[in-house]
Amino acid sequence: MMWVMSSARPSNRFRYVPPAGSRRLRLTVTWDGAAYAGWQSQPSLPNVQDTLQRAFLPLSPDVFRPVAAGRTDAGVHAEAMPVHVDVPAGFGVPLPKLARALNAFLPSTLAVLDAGAAPPGFHARFSCNERRYVYRLLCAPQRHPLWEGRALHRFGPLDVAAMNAAAAALTGTHDFAAFATQEDRQTVRELRTLQVVPVGEIWEIHVVGESFLRHMVRGLVGTLLLVGAGRLKAGAVGDILASGQRGQAGANVPAHGLYFSGASYGEISSGTVESGRVEEAMGRNT
């Protein structure tokens, strides 16, 4: 399942509508993070947002900038990123053929998995009430070329029970300032899932929440690795949370092991906001 419409607690107050004379599409997009400086448009740097918008131009020159459920950092991969894009009302490409049409203009590092009409009131970022990440570890004596750039290689033993005990202590609603990098927003977040799942040589660390601070996921994983290696007691993570000091937690792990794996959406409420007024209504940019 690429992205989920659920009845669980709606996170947005508004029902978003596209600009006059346009209609909203939703896409599921995947990419290799090694090729990009992140999702967001950046001058002179390769990024997913601009690359995806350019693929629309041969199909229609009047397409608005795409909006994603999450704005990933440089090097972070995406398995199933929900995206919306507003196109002219008379956009002529049949929706069942749109993914293939876009992929013809996209590089091999980026692909649209599916495309269709967005539900009424849908906004890929502000309607999202759950985001899911996976961090992958290659736990093996030797590196593996097929996992190069796809998983962090760890050749020493890791105590999965201790890691999951620490993860359980971090789950819930806390002030995660100690795990964020240069964060100027309020730092209280709800961490719904943090779990280490070892399967053979590839271990996965599952991280689920409504929203995350800058580099929070990578800081959480770095701290769990310290616990797994015996360099930090599982019970110490509570003190790290309470300290609010970034230097108390583990270092950010490299981006190449991190994947945006999916998102969920709740019911759309009845209040409406035109897309051009989203920044005013929410107090932040899309």
Image (tube, grey):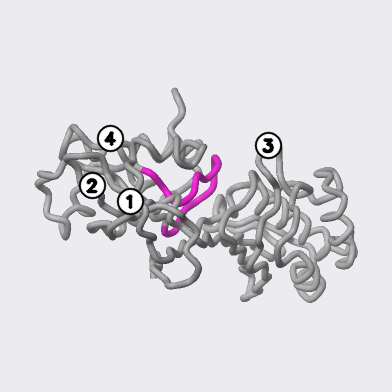
Q: Earlier in the sequence, mark 3 or mark 2?
A: 2
Measure how far apart labels 3 and 4 are at the Cα level: 32 Å
Measure how far apart labels 3 and 2 are at the Cα level: 37 Å
- Indicate the secondary structure of the residue bearing disc 3: loop
Query: x and y percent of residue 249 in the render?
Result: 82, 51
Mark sitting on residue 111:
1
Q: Earlier in the sequence, mark 2 or mark 1?
A: 2
- Location of mark 4 (residue): 54
Measure how far apart labels 2 and 1 are at the Cα level: 8 Å
Query: x and y percent of residue 84 in the render?
Result: 33, 49
What is the three-letter code of the residue carrying label 4?
Arg
| Part of the protein shown in magenta | 67-80
Can you say which quadrant of the picture contains the C terminus? top left
Residue at the image point whose x is 45% and y is 40% from the top: 281
Numbered disc in front, either 3 or 2: 3
Mark sitting on residue 102:
2
What is the three-letter code of the residue carrying label 3?
Asp
Measure how far apart labels 4 and 2 are at the Cα level: 9 Å
- Indicate the secondary structure of the residue bearing disc 1: strand
Q: Earlier in the sequence, mark 3 or mark 4?
A: 4
Q: Are marks 3 and 1 in contact (CB under 8 Å)?
A: no
What is the three-letter code of the residue carrying label 1?
Ala
Numbered disc in front, either 3 or 4: 3
- Indicate the secondary structure of the residue bearing disc 4: helix
Q: Is residue 274 above or below residue 131?
A: above
Numbered disc in front, either 3 or 1: 3
Residue at the image point whose x is 47% and y is 36% from the top: 285
- Location of mark 3 (residue): 184
